[in-house]
Image (spheres, grey):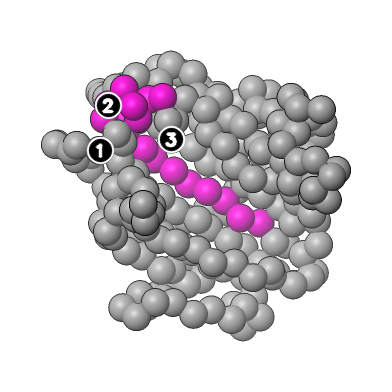
Amino acid sequence: ALGKGNNAAIKEPIEPVALPEALAAPEPAPTASTEAAAYLLRATAVSFVAGKDYRTTEHLTVRMLTAAGVERFSTLHFDLDPRYERAYLNQLRVLDESGAVVSKGSADDCYLSDQASEELGTSLRALDVPVPGLKVGCTLELTLTRRALDPHRPDFRRHFLAAGLPVLKSVYYLEGDLKAVRHHASPGVTPQPSGRGLAWVVKAPPVYKSEP
């Protein structure tokens, strides 16, 4: 049946993977744009220690530029497979243009929707995160962490540093057993030592537009 599913997979606190201080600051908001919203920071931080720890944290800072942006980000959606992972909303804040906090979200507000069906043979769910109090000119700050139930080896991942909206700073950060992880990046994107790991950083990559 469609609707809200078993939420046990998203209620247990998980320690986030912190970004090194040099990478954590968002970029200034654009003064003029025709886009609905802009990512001031779009970062993924991964910690992998074979057999002990495999966590992935999303760090997002997004400025709402139009009503279309507010509508787009009023509820955030993340894919989650409870058979293999757990997730937890560490922080959700909405700031006004002066930087004052106008609203907060919590893990209690999140829920899993039963988008999967037994006929399709998948246990994939949608983790829905409502964002209260969002308005044009506001900034959304989100930290959300996943923990793999089997931390013995990393899975294959393809990560895009660009998105369908402007990204002023895009970061992929990896720490832990670096020698146990093989990686390859597009030409011109070179990992640099940062904190206790490696970081791939791109400022203002081209906006990704799908083919019509």
Q: Residue at x 66, y 49 (%)?
A: 146
**Which callout, 2 or 3, points at the residue further toward the start of the chain?**
2
The residue closer to the viewer here, 191 or 208, is 208
Residue 41, x across and y down, in percent? 36, 48
Mark 3: secondary structure? strand
- Residue 76 is left or right of residue 108, and the answer is left
Residue 111, x across and y down, in percent? 69, 28
Query: What amino acid type should be assigned to the residue bearing mark 2?
Result: Thr
Q: Which residue was labeled with disc 1?
A: 35
Q: Is residue 21 above or below residue 201?
A: above
Please name which of the two marks, 2 or 3, marks the residue nearer to the observer.
2
**Which callout, 1 or 2, points at the residue further toward the start of the chain?**
1
Asked whether the beta carbons under mark 1 and mark 2 sit within 8 Å of each other, the answer is: yes
Q: Which residue was labeled with disc 2?
A: 66
Split into 4 quadrants, where in the image is the N terminus? top right
Mark 1: secondary structure? loop
Give the Cα separation between the discs numbered 1 and 2.
Answer: 8 Å
Q: Is residue 200 above or below residue 66?
A: below
Mark 1 packing: few (<14 Cα in 10 Å), some, or many (20+)? some
Q: Residue at x 85, y 43 (%)?
A: 118
Q: Which residue was labeled with disc 3?
A: 141
Q: Which residues are magenta?
A: 55-71
Q: Is residue 10 above or below residue 187?
A: above
Q: Quadrant of residue 185?
A: bottom left
**Which callout, 3 or 1, points at the residue further toward the start of the chain?**
1
| Magenta residue check for 203 | no
Mark 3 packing: few (<14 Cα in 10 Å), some, or many (20+)? some
Give the Cα separation between the discs numbered 2 and 3.
Answer: 17 Å
Please name which of the two marks, 3 or 1, marks the residue nearer to the observer.
1
Asked whether the beta carbons under mark 3 and mark 1 sit within 8 Å of each other, the answer is: no
